[in-house]
Structures are given as C-alpha cells and as structure tokens.
Amino acid sequence: MQSVDLNSVKSFRCPSNYFFTSVGKKLVMGISGLVWAGFVMGHMAGNMLMFISPGAYNSYGHALTSGGLIYVVETVLLTALSIHVFFAVWLTVDNRRARGSQGYALSQKGSKGASIASRTMAAQGSLILAFIIFHLITFKFGPVYETTVNGVQMRDLHRLMVEVFQQPGYFAWYVFCLVLLGVHLRHGISSIFQSLGVLNSNNQATFQKVGIVYAIVVSLGFLSQPISVFLSR
Amino acid sequence: MKDHTLKLKLKVWRQASSKTLGRFVEYEASEVSTHSSFLEMIDQVNEGLIKKGEEPITFDHDCREGICGSCGFMINGEAHGPLKGTTVCQLHMRNFKDGETLTIEPWRAQAFPIIKDLMVDRSAFDRIIAKGGYISVDTGNAPDANSLPVPKPDADDAFMSAACIACGACVASCKNASAMLFVSAKVNHLSLLPQGGVERPERVHSMVAQMDAEGFGACTSTGSCSASCPKEISLSNIAKLNRELLFSALTRRQAPSGDGV
Ligand code: HEM
Ligand code: FES
C-alpha cells in the first residue's frame, strides 16, 4: 500500500513554509492583529487620563515619548501593521479567486448566512488603515503646542486634542472609525482563537463573548473621549 | 397531516457544459406533494421536460437518504436549502409555501467547475483524500472492543468528524470557497484515533498542501460552512485543524531520504 505522500507538494517541505499555507497565513493575521488589539486597549486606557487633568494627560504623553522605549514600540507596531496589511491583501486576493467570478444570484440569509462584521473585514481594515495614517498626521505630526507641567516643558497634546475634537468633521470621522474598529475587533478577536487553534466546542461560546466584550470596551472607551470634548464645546 | 399540493415557480441554472455559458430558466412545478423531497420535485419537473422533448435538469444524487454526499445545490442562496442539518434529498417540500419562487443554483467555486446544470466536479475533494485521508500503517485485525483505550471526548470528536459526507456545502456556502471544514473533518476523524495517530503530522501537512494547491480559499471564521453543513460539523473543528498543522510544522520529520525528493 502506498504511504501518505510526503513529497507531494515540494514547496511545503520546509517548516517555515507553514506561514504560506492558507492555515499559516491566518495565524500570521491573528498574531499581528493581536499586537494591535493589545495596543488599542492600552492606548485607550492611557488616554483616559484626559478625564483626570490636562496636566496628567500631557505628562503621560511626555513620559511615553521621551524614553528610548518608544522606538521599540513603534517598530513593533509598524512591523505588525505592515505584516497584517500584507497578509490581509494576500488572503483577500486568494479568497476572491477561490470564490470565482460567477457569484450567486441570491446571497445567504437567515441562520446559514455570515455576519456583516465577518464578511466585511477587508473593507473595515482598509478604512482603519486610512484612519491610522490620518490620525498620525493629525496628532503625531500635527501642530506642536508647548506647555509646562510641574516645571517640565512638554508638548501640549491635550490642547491639540481638544481643538481637533471640537470640529464636527473630525468628530464625526472619529466616531465612525472607532465604531468600525469595534466591528473589526468584534469579529477579529473571536477569530484569533480559531486561528491560534485554542478553540474547541466547549469554549467556543466563551470566546465569542470575549470578542464582543473586548470590542465594546475598546470602542466605547475610545468613543467617550471625543464625545466628551465635543459635548463640552 | 392533510395531504396537499404546491405550485411553485423555479428559476433553475441551466448550463450545457463547463465550456458554455449558463443562464437561469424558469419552470413551473405544479401538483407537488408536500410529502415529496426536493429531488423528487425536480424529478417530477424533469418528467414533464422529457415528455415535451426537452433536456432534463441534471443534478447529482445517489442514496437519497442523506448519507452519500452526492446531492446538493443552492436553494434561494442557501446550501441544501433553508433547513439546518439536511441535504436536499432529505428536504421535504412541506418546508416551502404554495406559490413560492425558488432560485436553484449549482455550488459555485473555482475548484468546483460546473459539469452540467446543477452538477459540479468535486474531484478536488478526492485528490485531497488521496493525500492522506486514510491509514496506511499496518494496524492488524479489528481489536476487541475496549482493548485500545480512546478517551471519550476524542472518540466523540472523531465520530462527529466522521459524519462528514463530503457534499461540498461548506465550500459552496463560504465566501472564500474554503474547504477548511471538509479537510478538518477528514483530518480529525483519523488523527484522534490510535490507528490514525501514527501518520498524524504527515497527514495534515499533505492534505492542507493539496487543499491549497486545488485553489480553495482560507478561513475567515464566518461560520457559514458549519451552519450549512448537513451533518452540522462544528466550526471548532477548523481550530483543531489549525492546531494540528502548527504541531505538524514543528514536529514533522522530513521525508525519509532516498524517496526521490
Ligand atoms: C488597529 C488596527 C487593527 C487591529 C486591532 C486588527 C485586528 C485584527 C484581528 C484580531 C483579526 C483576526 C485575525 C484572525 O482571524 O486570526 C483581523 C483580521 C483582519 N484584518 Fe485587521 N486589524 C487592524 C487593522 C487592519 C488593517 C489596517 C487592515 C487592512 C488594510 C486589516 C485587515 C484585516 C482583514 C482583511 C482581516 C481578515 C483576514 C481573514 O480572516 O482572512 N486589519 N484584524
Ligand atoms: S443523495 Fe445521498 S446524500 Fe443526498
């Protein structure tokens, strides 16, 4: 009898090629997504200092950006994002090709259909990418106001943030994108457990809930910030 | 239940071969017994077509009792129709309303080319099975019951996976035409059991490689596959496949030397 054919597909002989299988690509998406999911939670929590005082907010920002650690963090984030986007494009192209050019006349609905969140990950991701770029232009590379907190001169990011969120256009764009981030996380976080292979039939429902709770905490937490600024115009 | 009949409007995909273009053709199905199955309803339409000298609608079928996996097409955009856990051969017409319009399409995926009308070529599945969906080590005769210890959860999971009839509904319903649910079922069915465990790392490796080579898409965890599966195979099976492949990538021994590559 013939044994299981080990050499059938040569390109997949080396274990590192694992990352180029349809399964491995998803693991890469999951891990790079997880890095950013962790970052957005931390970023949201840190920004909550705006509710303490402008000084606390600015000192926090100053502390973050004055050490050398910021370069490490930025490198990790930029790398993770580049990988996430690269694999997202790759998977999306592959998946569309697999589906073929002839679509169905009617799409699935009801209990056999897929959630909108899961069907539109690529569109959400593209908008989030645009958001990240504009967000960096607005804040990181935006106008530099100076302030002094406890005798230390630093950038007045609080003033910049208030100025930005008081403008209806910016405000609406932020609200839209933060809801979108929540939607991306809602499907993404639950999906990570699938990609990492930790899901089983017992914990499946729990991980679905983890995704929902994580998305709500990040999204609502972030949203509270522009909303409070905008309402107190 | 009171016997009554339905009158339905069907929009059926007709395509003479993989080389020609297809289109929807409308048919009327009248005097359809609510006790008949969906396939029997099409049989009835076909009898009418044959009488008129027209080409009958081609569709795959064999056992007509939900176990062979031959049948399957989309009804109003849903694989195997609106009911969960059912194949079209087991789908009763009482699930439809009188006067309804039903749009009937073949499975669509790059890896499932249409042969004719509602019949598609699913030999890609066979080629995946040929890469490891069997046990090739000598396992001796059937052992006495309970002489090989198998943990109950493993036995349950293997059994659940073994229920896969390879109908292709998972691929057809997935927005990525991913065969992940099928492959996960075939891998887990064997790998969880002692006899199949011997070739565990090689099996998942070879089957996934063939799945990718056939042009199926990746998983986006939308869950449509599991929801459309007539055997209701769990989405978590795919997580198990992912785990198996990672484990295989880390532990798999290279092919023994001297076998060519
Ligand atoms: C804050 C930024 C982001 C976070 C936290 C994030 C998080 C995630 C997570 C956790 C997943 C699930 C991965 C898995 O299923 O294993 C995911 C999937 C995905 N992301 Fe993102 N993402 C972000 C930005 C982006 C960007 C900028 C893009 C594209 C331009 C993108 C496109 C996608 C796509 C297409 C998927 C689905 C991939 C698939 O399942 O095939 N994401 N994301
Ligand atoms: S004909 Fe065998 S499963 Fe439907």
Image (tube, rainbow, N blue to C red):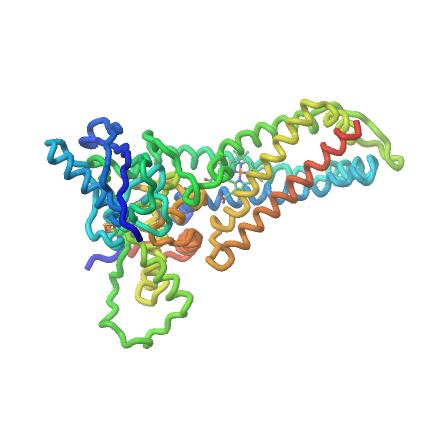
Q: Residue at x 20, y 36 (%)?
A: B115
Residue B187, quarter of picture: bottom left
Front-most of residues B121 and B127 = B121
Q: Position of residue A58 (x, y in %)?
A: 79, 35
Could you tell me residue A195's position as x and y percent? 47, 48
Q: Position of residue B146 (x, y in %)?
A: 33, 76
**Closest to the observer: A128 or B94?**
B94
**Quarter of the view holding residue B59:** top left
- Which is more toward the observer, B89 or A191? B89
Residue B102 against residue B199 in the figure, above or below = above
Q: Nearer the viewer, residue B59 or A34?
A: B59
Asked if residue B155 can be seen in this view, the reply is yes
Residue B258 visible within the image: no
B146, above or below B104, in the image: below
Query: In percent of the image, x 24 and y 29: which residue is there?
Result: B25
Q: Is residue B176 left or right of residue A220?
A: left
| Direction from residue A154 to residue B108 in the image, left or right | left
Query: In the displayed structure, would residue B161 be above or below residue A119?
Result: below
Residue B253 percent across, percent down from the top left: 36, 57
